[in-house]
Amino acid sequence: MLDTGIMSGADIVAALALGADFTLIGRAYLYGLMAGGRAGVDRTLQILEKDMARTMALLGVSRISELTPEHVRLLTN
């Protein structure tokens, strides 16, 4: 479980690739709620889902079960 720092679908994909069974999206959820109530939360979930799908496509995987730690790169300056 990862319970911090999730701001995009790519963050979710990275967490799952590194072994998380699931992630919590409290901050993103709250931003959507504050911006548009229930509709804002629904839109937040749509955005995260599309971002996850795009990230996985760019990685060349079509299923979450195909993700591995090798799909994550550490960025350095």
Image (spheres, rainbow, N blue to C red):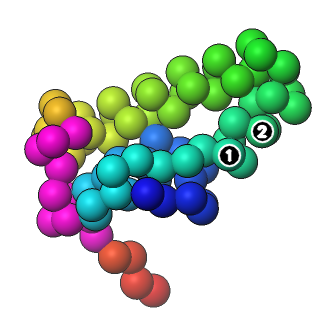
Q: Amino acid at mark 2?
A: Leu
In the image: residue 41, left or right of residue 14:
right
69 inside magenta stretch: yes
Q: Position of residue 2 (x, y in %)?
A: 48, 59
Label 1 and label 2: CA atoms lie apart by: 6 Å
Which quadrant holds residue 15? bottom left
6 inside magenta stretch: no
55 vs 45: above or below: below
Q: Which residue is mark 1?
A: 26
Residue 39's disc is: none
Q: Are marks 1 and 2 in contact (CB under 8 Å)?
A: yes
The residue lying at 46 percent from left, 41 percent from top is: 9
**Front residue of this view, candidates 2 and 35:** 2
Q: Which residues are magenta?
A: 64-73
Q: Position of residue 69 (x, y in %)?
A: 20, 65
3 vs 41: above or below: below
**Front residue of this view, candidates 24 and 74:** 24
Point out the image quarter for the N terminus.
bottom left
Q: Position of residue 5 (x, y in %)?
A: 59, 61
Q: Which residue is mark 2?
A: 30
Q: Amino acid at mark 1?
A: Gly
